[in-house]
Image: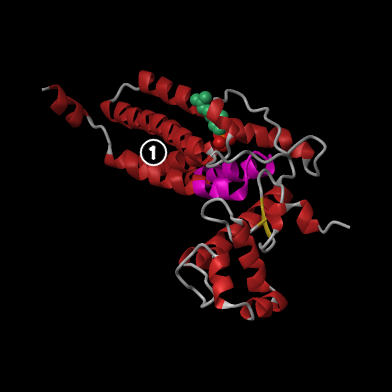
Amino acid sequence: MPSPKAKNPNRSGGSPVLGGTGGRCDFMPLTKPLNRPSPQSHLLQRQGSDPTTARLRASESPTRRRGSSSSTGSASGQGLSDEDGIRLNPTFLGVALSSLLAVDLWLSKRMGVCACEDSSWGSVRPLMKLIEISGHGVPWLAGTAYCLYKSDTVAGQEVMLNLLIGLLLDLVLVAMVKGVVRRPRPTYNRMDMFATVSVDRYSFPSGHATRAAMCGRFLLAHLVLAAPLRVLVLLWTGLVGLSRVLLGRHNVTDVMFGFWMGYCQYNLVEMLWLSPQTLLGQLT
Ligand SMILES: CC(C)=CCC/C(C)=C/COP(=O)(O)O
């Protein structure tokens, strides 16, 4: 009977680590080869973990050992190169990242309780979609442009203009990161969002989370709001992020990173702040 290893060559020599995409948990080797894995590297990995074969290897003649490996350096005194040493020892960071990814996929799937109408919290889905719309780029861009047009004070126009710049900057930065990372959305997500662009098929980071964090900070800093309204802004920001996971649109890490990115984007808006003085200075 063929062994499970023979069926799936990717599993040889690796520890079981949860990975994969879109909420699916796959097994993958911790010891990812740097280049294409040679037959020897698989052999070495097995020998490193199996005491019997390790003993057999120790009893081999040095000439044969040298002949069986193309490397000249020795990491463990048995003809292993530095490169083999790297393959054999998964880094702490690698293990930590794989574990974080596994927890992220597991937690996100459990939290996706409004992913469709038949989900356990499917009846709350319309409310979550309303929160989604409140953090969408189109109403924010349209609302800000309208306020800019309607504003009759220079101070008001200055604030609205910079918010508009921030919103456009957010769209560009999120599209760039999504395009580079290309993390697919969870498999259980139903792609029924309105007004999406091509990069929105990717999930990292959550554009709603970046926008909510940036706009939340912006509103708190530039609008004179009473305390209850300030609490409401914070609540709205948190709800937009939470709704992304509940709707099954994103994994938890997409939203966490999105919040962090939006927080930093606000700093960028402050750095690039356009004031009437700057504009007049550039014109004269
Ligand atoms: C078309 C415009 C102006 C904005 C797109 C807004 C949008 C659909 C972002 C995706 O957000 P998530 O990454 O949170 O799903």
Q: Where 16 sits versus 217, above or below?
A: below
| Residue 135 found in image quarter | top right
Q: Nearer the viewer, residue 34 or 29?
A: 34
Q: Is residue 244 left or right of residue 93?
A: right
Q: Which residues are magenta?
A: 232-257
Q: Quadrant of ligand 1?
A: top right
Mark 1 highlights which residue?
223
Q: Nearer the viewer, residue 242 or 6?
A: 6
Locate the C terminus and report the quarter of the image it occupies. Answer: top left
Residue sticking out furthest to the right: 1
Helix, strand or loop at disc 1? loop
Residue 55 falls within the magenta-colored stretch: no
Task: Where is residue 215? Give x, y as percent.
Answer: 44, 38
Q: How busy is the neighbourhood of tag 1: few (under 14 within 10 Å), some, or many (20 plus)?
A: few
Task: Where is residue 107? Give x, y as percent.
Answer: 68, 54
Residue sticking out furthest to the left: 284
Task: Where is residue 33? Give x, y as percent.
Answer: 56, 56
Q: Residue at x 48, y 67 (%)?
A: 81
Q: Nearer the viewer, residue 119 or 162?
A: 119
Q: Is residue 2 left or right of residue 38?
A: right
Q: Residue at x 72, y 78 (%)?
A: 52
Task: Where is residue 157? Give x, y as percent.
Answer: 31, 26
Q: Is residue 280 left or right of residue 272?
A: left
Magenta segment's dominant SS is: helix
Q: Where 197 sits versus 71, above or below?
A: above
Q: Where 94 sits versus 135, above or below?
A: below
Q: Residue at x 45, y 69 (%)?
A: 73
Residue type beneath disc 1: Leu
Q: Is there any visible trace of residue 77 in the rendered image?
A: yes
Q: Is there any visible trace of residue 136 in the rendered image?
A: no
Q: Residue at x 49, y 35 (%)?
A: 179
